[in-house]
Every structure is written in C-alpha cells, then in structure tokens.
Image: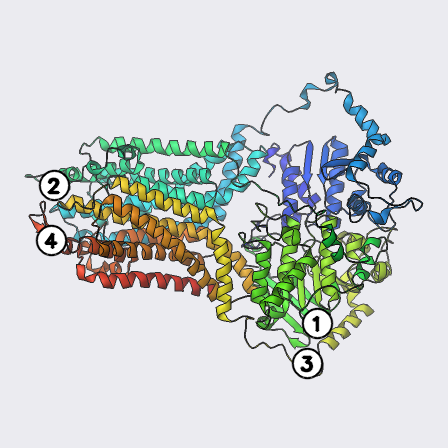
Amino acid sequence: MATATEGQESNIVTDYTLKILGLDICADTMVGDEMLRGISGGQRKRVTTGEMLVGPANALFMDEISTGLDSSTTFQIVSSLRHYVHILNGTAVISLLQPAPETYDLFDDIILISDGQVVYHGPREYVLDFFESMGFRCPERKGVADFLQEVTSKKDQAQYWVRRDQPYRFVTVTQFAEAFQSFHIGGKLGEELTVPFDRTKSHPAALTTKKYGINKKELLKANFSREYLLMKRNSFVYLFKLSQLFIMALVAMTLFLRTEMHHENMDDAGVYAGAVFFMLITVMFNGLAEISMTIAKLPVFYKQRNLLFYPSWAYAIPSWILKIPVTIVEVAVWVFLTYYVIGFDPNVGRFFKQYLVLLIVSQMASGLFRTIAALGRNMIVANTFGAFAIITVVALGGFILSKRDIKSWWIWGYWISPLMYGQNALMVNEFLSNSWHNATHNLGVEYLESRAFFTDSYWYWLGLGALVGFVFLFNVMFGLALEFLGPFDKPQATITEDESSNEGTLADIELPGIESSGRGDSLVESSHGKKKGMVLPFEPHSITFDEVVYSVDMPQEMKEQGVQEDRLVLLKGVSGAFRPGVLTALMGVSGAGKTTLMDVLAGRKTGGYIDGSIKISGYPKKQETFARISGYCEQNDIHSPHVTVYESLLYSAWLRLPSSVDSKTRKMFIEEVMELVELNPVRNSLVGLPGVSGLSTEQRKRLTIAVELVANPSIIFMDEPTSGLDARAAAIVMRTVRNTVDTGRTVVCTIHQPSIDIFEAFDELFLMKRGGQEIYVGPLGRHSSHLIKYFESIEGVSKIKDGYNPATWMLEVTATAQELSLGVDFTDLYKNSDLYRRNKQLIQELGQPAPGSKDLHFPTQYSQSFLVQCQACLWKQRWSYWRNPPYTAVRFFFTTFIALMFGTIFWDLGGKHSTRGDLLNAIGSMYTAVLFLGVQNASSVQPVVAIERTVFYREKAAGMYSALPYAFAQILVELPYVFVQAVTYGVIVYAMIGFEWTAEKFFWYLFFMYFTLLYYTFYGMMTVGLTPNHHIASIVAAAFYAVWNLFSGFVVTRPSIPVWWRWYYWACPVAWTIYGLVASQFGDLTEPMTSEGQKIVKDFLEDYYGIKHDFIGVSAVVVAGIAVLFALIFAVSIKTFNFQKR
C-alpha cells in the first residue's frame, strides 16, 4: 500500500491508518473473493479507503465510504478524516449514505444536491434555517440528514410543512435552488465565485510537479516484490503446471522411446519431426494459462494505474522478468527428461542448443498470451483471440502444411510465424547432425528438402535471433496495451422510468401512516392499516437455537505466529429464539460474527464444525425440509446476469412454489411481490454483473429480497438488507421487510448503521460483541426504552443524549475500549440478568412441539417434478445464451473466420492425393480444424459456466432444483448453437478445400464435425465442473489437449505408436474423429499414388495410418458416445462437488 510515501516513515503511516480504520485485527488476512473466504464486507470497504489515505494526497474525494460499516466505525473514520483535514489543511469531499446524526455533525459544510441541482451549499449550521425560511421544519427525533434527503422528494415533503395558515403546495427542486441564490449564504457564495482567484498569493510549490510519488527504481522494486508475493501465494498454479509438464514428458518419452526409433528411412525421419513438433506445441500451449491469470489481475491494475500508483511499464516488466526463472525450470524439466530418451543426437552441444530454443519459445508464448490478454481485457474475447493466434502460428509454422504448399497470398504468415523460426531451428539442429547421414547418402538433408525446411546450419542462429526479437516485441506490446487501453466494460446505470407518469398507481401502494413519520413508531404501525398482498397461505414457524458453537480450522498464517489451538472459535455458545410476526435485528460491530450466525442457522456453511441444537417449531432442523420453508437473502447479490428482473422472479417462483399452484396464481403472486418491493419500474431491465453493468445496488438488493419472497417462505434471513442504500432506498427496503413481517412470517436481519427510523422499526434486538458472544437479547420497546433502561442500569455507562440514535449509542457504550475502562464483561452481565433467564425459559417453551403439530414433511425433496425443473432451467439458460453475444456471436464469427482462413490456406487440396505430401496436407487440414475449433469451444465455454455456477450454488442451497436438471439444461442449450457452428464451418470448408461432393461423404463430414465440437464443448464444461475455478479448469483442460493432439494419429501414426501406448489411441476422442473423417473421405479411393510406387490410396491409408473404410460406423458411434459421456461427467460433477468455501 504505502510505497507511495518514502522509506521508513511509510511503515508508521501504514500502521496508523490500519489503527484508525480498525483494520489492525485483520492486517494479515487475505482479501478473498466470491469463492475464497477472506475479510468481511465492511473490512473490504475500509481497505479501499485506507489504500487512498496512506498516499500523500491533499484533496480527497470519497464516494460512499461508509457502505457496509456499522455507525460507530463510520464515526471513527470520519472523525479521523476531520482531524486530518483540519491539521494538515487538506480538502475532503465525502458523499455518504444514511449518515448517523453524530457523523453528520462532524462536517463543516453541506452540499445538498437533488435532481442535478444544488439546493444548498454552505455551512452546516444554517441549513435548517434555510428550509425554515421556505416553510419546512425538521421534527424532533429525526436525523437532520434524513430530513434533508426527504424534504426535496415529492413523496415525503408534505409532512414537514409548518405554516399551518397557508395551504401546502409542492415546492419543486428548481424553486429551492432559486430561493437558495437569494438566501444570505447563497448570495455570499455567488460573490466569492465572481471575484477571480488572485494568483500572486499562491506559493509555486503548492502543486506537485512529479507524476509519481517515488523514483523509478523504487517503483520497480515495489512492483517486483508485489508480483513475487502474488506468485508465491499462487504457487499452486505453477506447481500444477510443472507436474503437468512432467507427466507430458513421461508420455512423450515412452511414446518416442529410442529402442523403437530408427534412422533407416523417411518414415523414421517423420516420427522424429513429429517429436520435435510436439515439443514445440507443448511448450507453446503451456503459456495459455497466462491469459486467464493476466485478466484476473487487470481490474486492480487499471484502478491503480489511473490513480498514478505506478506507470504501466513498472507493472509490465516484473510480470515478465519474474516468469523467466519459472520458464527456465519448466523447460529444463522437459528437455532434460526427454532429450536422450527419445534418442535425439547425442552431442551435448546440440542438447543445449535445443534447450535454448525451447526456452525462448516458451518466453515468446507467454509474452504473446499476456499481450492478447491485455488487448482483449475480457476472458471470452481474449480466449478467442488466443486460440486464433495459435492457429495462425501453428497452421503456417511449416509442419502441418509444408512451405511449398502455402499459397502465395498466405506466405507472409509463414514468415511472421514465430513457430516457423523455432521449428526450423530445431529441425536444422537435429537433422544436420552425424546420426542422420552415412557415407553413401544424407537422409537428414533429404527429409528436410522433402518437407521444404531450410538445410543451412546458420538457420539455427537465425531462428533463435528471430525468437528473441519476438519476445521483446510481445512484451513491449504488452506494456503499450496496458498503457493505452482502459477497462473493457463501462459501468452504466439503469434509468428507471419517470415516476410522475404512473403517479396514480404508486399512490395505492404507498402505505398509510408513512406520511406522519414524525412520530417515532409510525413505521411499526403503518402496515396495520390495510393488509396488502400475499395471496398464498403459509404456516408460521419459530426457530430456536441453544448454545450454538461454530469453529473453523485455525488458518495457517495464525499458526505461524505461535497460536497453539487447532480451531478458531467464531461463535461461543449463543442462544436465542426468533418468533413469527416479530422482526429481529442482529447487530454488532464489524466482525462480531453476525453473518456467521446467520449462515449457521440457515445451513449455508459448507466448512467448519457446528455444535448445539437448532430447532424449528420444536423439531430438530433438517436442512432438506428447512430449505423449503426458509429464504436467505445474501449480502452480495448473486444473480444470472443475462435475464431480466421479471424473468428472475418468474423463474424463482416457478421452481420454489409447490406444484399445486397454477401459473395464473403464480403470476398474480409475482405481481404482488414486485409491487411490495417496488420493482415495477425496472421489470424489463437486464440484471447484469454487479459493479459492471445492469441494475444499481439498491435495485439489486430489492431483487434479492423479491427472489426469496416469491418462494413464499415462513422464515426469512436477510444479511444486511440496507447496506449500500441511501436513506430513502433503505426506508423502501425496510418497508418491504416490515410488510413481510406483518403477514406473520419470521424475519431476521443483520444490520449495519441503521438510522433511528430504521432501528425502531425492529421489535427485538440480538446484540453481539466481537468474538461471537451475545450481550443483549430482548425487546426494544417504544423509542428503544427497554434497551436504554437495560444498559443505563449498568454502573458507569454514560446516559444517552436526547435525540441521539440508540443504535449508535449502544454500539459505543459496549465497545471493547469501554469494557476495559469500566472493567466489566458485558457477556457475563447479560448471563446473570433476568433477561437471560426469561430468554432461556422462552427457548424452553418454543423448543417443545405444539400439541397436534407434525414435523415438517414434504413428499418430494423439491417442490417441482424433475421435468418441470428441467423445463425451467432450460428456459432460463436459453435466454442467458441468447443475450450473451460476447460468447455466442464471438464463437460463431470465429468459426466462420477460421473456415475462410483454412479454406484459403488449404485451397483445393482435398482433391489431390497422388503423392504422400498431398495426402498429408489434406489430412493436416482436418486435424488442425478439429483441434483448434474444439479447443476454442472448450476454452470459451469455461468462463460462462463458471459464472453461472456461482448462481447455481445459491439456488441449489435454496432448494430450487437438484443438480441434474441444471446440468441437463446447460447441456441441451448448447446443442443448437453448436449445430449452426458445425454447419457453417462444414459448408464453407468443404467447398473451398474441394473434397468430393457426394451426399454420403458430405453427411459424414458434418456428422463428425458436429459431434467433435460437441464433445469439446462438453469437455470444457466438465473441466469447470471438476475444478474450483476457471483458471484451474483452463490449465487442466490444456493438459489433455496436448495429449489428445499427440495421440490423434497425425503427429505419430498409429502403426508407429509403441505397442504399450496403442490402447490410448483407441481411448483418444480426437483419434476417432480423424479416423472417421479420413476413412469417409479417402478410404474408398482406388487411384494409384505416384510417390508410393503406384500403391492405391486405400491400401496406403491401411498401411501407413491403419485406417479402414468399413470401420466408419463404429467410429461414428464412438464419437457420439464420447460427447454423451462428457456431458454425463459434467452432470455428476456438478451434483457431487461443491467448491464454495463459506
């Protein structure tokens, strides 16, 4: 963080900032993301603030720094900022959501903006006078901040009107703004702005002239150390790649074992050339993981680059240099293992020359993929371009298609393909050696000439030089791409339809009594007026828990610091009861274990150890039945990005309401829920990814609540339903929650920094202190009187000030610092109080089943039948795919593009089969097509499945469907897309390469292409299903591409494969595809071949490739079978593995 300030003092600054922000307790914890458990939401928010504070900045612009923090922490941060500003003459502009009154009182100036106009800008003291002069007064027990937010809005304005003698008319924002101009503050501001600033007064050194905080050497050093740390933390990936290379090397060694490798004739030379080609391809593909790893780091890089942490070259250089040692080791493993075993030329000099070339090729590949990642900036686009780059480089590298067969319009591709230089250098290095020529005739040179490679020895050094050039070129391009390109997606807000147009409809939803919100408990009474909504009946349930203890394994970092225990206890024996029709707030400082308790009760924890009893209406809780009657609104709102709001709800209701509810009732129910949650204005907007596109935070929050409500649950858990919302949005959400409770449901919310209004909408409070122990469990009382009475009765606790927010006061008096100064432990006090005994008694009573009640029981585990689940999942997937052009359209264009490219590269080669070279070229075209289109499909499907899978975890935990329908839907939705892809490709290529136009052959060609693309796509899905995230998936998948490539029967033909690997040829999907394609195209030809001494094509195929024409049927069945097999493995893996750690 703090490398922006120089040297020693930076540590002091860092520690100080950590202390102010209260981050000292988690200073050594990983930050984490959706799948990796890290710090809590509030702490993450504070890390963002701290990252800016440690720098030497004087002007601070802070946007909503308090989201997800409790009010006392917010107060601490703002007050420290205030000191900072006053002492160091800084400037700070802070936009806050729902600031608590005491936080609001810390500010000097207020800017109030409404509908894009400044309503007030000036000292805080005068803001109320200004509104009084307009005829509006802030009532007692109402935060000024909340008053300011409501007084300009149409709905809430009337309740503050104080001039009883005049009739109230709505005062528009424009009127306010004009009135402010004439108000004395506004006038003064206007005058100040008309006088131009006097330049002579400012000191020349006031503005900094340097762009970065420290010199170039330090910048590089800081980036090196960070990149090194990241690599150390991510060492799993590198070890995995190493072991993968090791296994590939073993395969290659045993496949090309030297006892089987002779130096007699052209066929043997072909096998050696195959070995060389395979080495190159392996080393090349090994860099493919670079793409996903680079893209994962880009968002952070863009943020830090734009804030001038460092220039982009300082980021690009370490990520190149630090990878070099890794490459050296990887290539060493490969070459040292395989060189002598395969039986390359025994001369040591040539051995090291080969090592050198492969080392540079590896560098070149990782440079290339990094550049592609920085240019693509989006997983799907980058993968497509990555695959495209490989194709161009490989197809024109001189092995698959020899140089003399490359058309004149593609020859430039040959000269700029880095692989061509590597291939030639290695070929020259091997075939010009002593083992390839004897006294009479030089086999090596003959082979090189037959495949049109260069025969001069200086080509080794030329190739090496060219490769080094490419390494530098790609890394410079990487730096430039980082410098000039911004993030891929621009965040966009959804504009809701103007509310004035449908004024009439909204008025009915408005709950009576809200207008008189001057009285403290109006929110509570509001909804007893008329009960609105909820057609479907449900039975109320209570939930009790007694002495619940939750612990996790002690993290490795803490063990290293000398902690002895094996387990870290997060909840230390908490007990309580939640009853129907009672709204309970779960509160406590950040990190007290609120979310943890919630997850434990809702059964969402996947790791850790839970002890203690949890009962539902007196019966022990069973997760299967419990999921059917409970809803859980998560803190981070996970939804499928490509469906609309209405569709999300429809889908949830469809799968979670009992099957007895018909679709008409269901739609009515959804309409009611949407009205209750006020989602109607955005019903047709796409959801989008959080923070990137689509809905705003509070709309997403309300969607999360709505998705749970349409399931008609009896018990609802909400994790921070109001964090990230401003006062008005929070009030809407709380109104939703309150309405839900008044229908007789049990609702539990964890909550951060509530305003007085929101806090007093709750009936009961469950207060926890840091370390997971409860301090107060009981009713709030009117104006929080019970709560206040309880704490004020403790000796030494300061009395609450008038009009002060009880929630904030309560967190302040129970803070750890207070405990120390009073010398008491609030937990013990609570355990000895009457309150505790009353609660225990209540738990006892509710823990007995009511007479005549039955344990929860459902005839089936899921509310809908298997078929309906499939139907619903398929419906959603169909929309998701249709609306995801970066995936579907890119894939389609890619196919067309490659088809045209291959068509032009292999123009009219399909009809030629008079020489061995021609036949090899034709088969080469099929081989590359299969390999590359397939790899492209597999790698582009991975991120799509990975994003959907996080949603799947949430929906499965909610008991919406079992894993199989989900998997089937994901599989079925691919079929039409892949079909279109196969047909486009087939038609274009078949015509351009000029294969035989008979119906039978064309049909076979399409059939094999379709199923091949299909099994590749399913293979990609399967790897995601079997691995924790798509980075690891892409590495695992890459391993198999290489093996399949090797055994496909093109690089090494089946008769040349040693007997102990033959079995794998039959197990290799690509081999079957190529077998089918070659057999159906050429297997029945009876024309003689000139180069093979008039042998007919059919016989040559049987001798050289072992391919027989009458075996087509079998290969067709096998290829289709492989696709089905992969799909099934995907389904099973989704069903049995859960990689979410919570």
**Dot 1 amino acid type:** Ser
Whether residue 328 appears in this view of the structure is no
Which residue appears at 38% of the width and 57% of the height?
1019
**Dot 3 amino acid type:** Ser
Alpha carbons under labels 3 and 1: distance apart = 13 Å
- The circle on residue 853 is 3
Quarter of the image with the N terminus in it: top right
Closer to us: mark 3 or mark 2?
3
**Mark 3 / mark 4, whichever is N-terminal:** 3
Badge 3 marks a residue whose secondary structure is loop
**Dot 2 amino acid type:** Leu
Circles 3 and 4, Cβ within 8 Å, touching? The answer is: no
Seen in the image, is 452 located left or right of residue 793?
Answer: left
**Dot 4 amino acid type:** Thr
* Most foreground residue, 935 or 229: 935
Local crowd size for mark 1, using a 10 Å CA cut-off: few (<14), some (14–19), many (≥20): many
617 in relation to 921, above or below: below
763 in relation to 342, above or below: below
Per the image, the residue denoted by label 2 is: 443
Circles 1 and 2, Cβ within 8 Å, touching? The answer is: no
Residue 985, image x, y percentages: 32, 48
Alpha carbons under labels 1 and 2: distance apart = 87 Å
The answer to which image quadrant residue 839 occupies is bottom right
Per the image, the residue denoted by label 4 is: 1086
Residue 687, image x, y percentages: 58, 51
Alpha carbons under labels 4 and 2: distance apart = 31 Å
Local crowd size for mark 4, using a 10 Å CA cut-off: few (<14), some (14–19), many (≥20): few
Badge 2 marks a residue whose secondary structure is helix
* Residue farthest bottom in this picture: 852
